[in-house]
Every structure is written in structure tokens, then in C-alpha cells.
């Protein structure tokens, strides 16, 4: 199993550009989520999904869109990048919505918006 | 609503010394508690978790944590640290009642453990 994979590892964007951060998992996990990590702020939830076709907003959803057309993939779209979106982005998955189960994290995408 | 407070943003310690990383939580219901570790330039991985039963939980790499319900704490400890333990440590809490959005874990802001030779 590759686990949770994320591409790209690094990205530099100009203000106003759009892009998609890719996330895939091969563990047949129902629950997937996107976090951003900023210094001193810990992890903040952007969007999450409890299964294909079902998504919902987290704590900081503005400026981001998601979709879940398959169990495996959960891409995160930045509609019009802003410098405030400079961050490290992590995708995570969990076998079910059951909160007793641990989350598995990808290696992260480091995004810089100029 | 649940929240997590990690009381120290940074903990410097010398190699082979003991360490304690503090975590306090607040929640109106019973909780599940987790500690994750993030090594430099990597994603997070699970160190240990408390679901129920014994309040002392043992994890990987010699770490352990104790759940204290009366003090709403879940402090992480290791009796003797190594240079390789240098990392960011995150405490997380999930409500045990899986309804609505309550299965979403809340993370603390992290504690940076710096082990000096």
C-alpha cells in the first residue's frame, strides 16, 4: 500500500492563479479531509468527506473547493490564490467516520503564493 | 464544542533526559484522545491513543500518556529522549458520540520538542 499520496510536493503560484492539489489513498477509506498547517496555528480543517459524493466544510473553507467523485481521490482546488493561502497542506484519510480510528496523513504540499 | 490546549509551544531538553508534553482538553461529552508526531518535512503519524479502559497508554518509540479525567489532561511522557525524538507533537481529541460533525478531531497547536546532545 502506498497509503496517502499528495502531489505536488512544492508549488509556487502568483496571486490570482488557480490550481488543484491532488490527494489519493489506496486503503479504501471512507473518510478524507484536508488541513492546512501554519506556524503556531496547528492543523486547521478546510474540508472533509465521509464518502464518495459527500463533502462538507471545515473550520477554514473560504477560497477552497473540493469534490469526491471516487473513494480514492479527494482533490483540493484553490480558485484564485491569495498570499494568505501560503501554507503546508495535508490530506488525511480514516477507515470510517468512527472517531476511534486514527487518521493517516500524506506527506504534505508546501504552497507559496506570491 | 471541544477544544485542545497544548501548554508549551516549545520544549528544549537534553538527550537522555525525561520529558513531558502537556495537553489539556475541554469537551461536554466523553472523548477519545490522540497524540501524533510530525518529523521534519513529513506528515503526521499516530504515536498513541486513548479510547477507554486503562488510563495509562503506551505508544511507539517508548512514549506513554496518561488520561486524567478530573484534570481533563492527556500528557505525553518519555523517560529518556533521543536526538531522533526531535519533532512536532500534536494532541487531538474526538467526541465519542459519533453524530453530526462530532467525529471530526480537533488538534492542538503543537509542541516542538527539541533534543540537544
Image (cartoon, coloured by chain):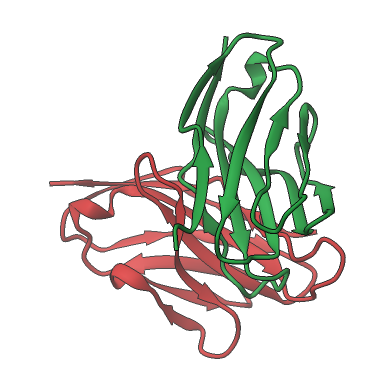
Chain colours: A green, B red
Seen in the image, is B16 located left or right of residue B64? left
- Residue A78 screen position, x and y as percent: 71, 26
Q: Find residue B21 and report its horizontal and vertical position in percent.
A: 42, 58
Q: Is B93 displayed left or right of B84 in the figure?
A: right
The N terminus of chain B sits in image quarter: bottom right
Residue at the spot x=57%, y=56% of the render? A25
**Vertical order, A17 against A29 (above or below):** above
Q: Nearer the viewer, residue A94 or B83?
A: A94
Seen as rendered, the residue at the extreme left is B117
Q: Residue at point 84% right, 54% down?
A: A53
Quadrant of residue B79 within the rendered picture: bottom left
Q: How many labels sit on residues?
A: 0
> Is B12 placed left or right of A98 in the picture?
left
Location of residue A46 by image quarter? top right
Q: Residue furthest front?
A: A70
Placement of A10 over or under A74, stated as above or below: above
Amino acid at each position: 500500500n502506498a497509503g496517502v499520496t499528495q502531489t505536488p510536493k512544492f508549488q509556487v503560484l502568483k496571486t490570482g492563479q488557480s490550481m488543484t492539489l491532488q490527494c489519493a489513498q489506496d486503503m479504501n477509506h471512507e473518510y478524507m479531509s484536508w488541513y492546512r498547517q501554519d506556524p503556531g496555528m496547528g492543523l486547521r480543517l478546510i474540508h472533509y468527506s465521509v464518502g464518495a459524493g459527500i463533502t462538507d466544510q471545515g473550520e477554514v473553507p473560504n477560497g477552497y473547493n473540493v469534490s469526491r467523485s471516487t473513494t480514492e481521490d479527494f482533490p483540493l482546488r484553490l480558485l484564485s490564490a491569495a498570499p494568505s493561502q501560503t501554507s503546508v497542506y495535508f490530506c488525511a484519510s480514516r477507515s470510517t467516520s468512527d472517531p476511534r480510528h486514527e487518521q493517516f496523513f500524506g506527506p504534505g504540499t508546501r504552497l507559496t503564493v506570491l | 464544542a471541544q477544544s485542545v490546549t497544548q501548554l508549551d509551544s516549545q520544549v528544549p531538553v537534553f538527550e537522555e533526559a525525561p520529558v513531558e508534553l502537556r495537553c489539556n482538553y475541554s469537551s461536554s461529552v466523553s472523548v477519545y484522545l490522540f497524540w501524533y508526531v510530525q518529523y521534519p518535512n513529513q506528515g503526521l503519524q499516530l504515536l498513541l491513543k486513548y479510547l477507554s479502559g486503562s488510563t495509562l497508554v503506551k505508544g511507539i518509540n517508548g512514549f506513554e500518556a496518561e488520561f486524567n479525567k478530573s484534570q481533563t489532561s492527556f500528557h505525553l511522557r518519555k523517560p529518556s529522549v533521543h536526538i531522533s525524538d526531535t519533532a512536532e507533537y500534536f494532541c487531538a481529541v474526538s467526541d465519542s458520540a459519533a453524530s453530526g460533525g462530532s467525529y471530526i478531531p480537533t488538534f492542538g497547536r503543537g509542541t516542538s520538542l527539541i533534543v540537544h546532545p
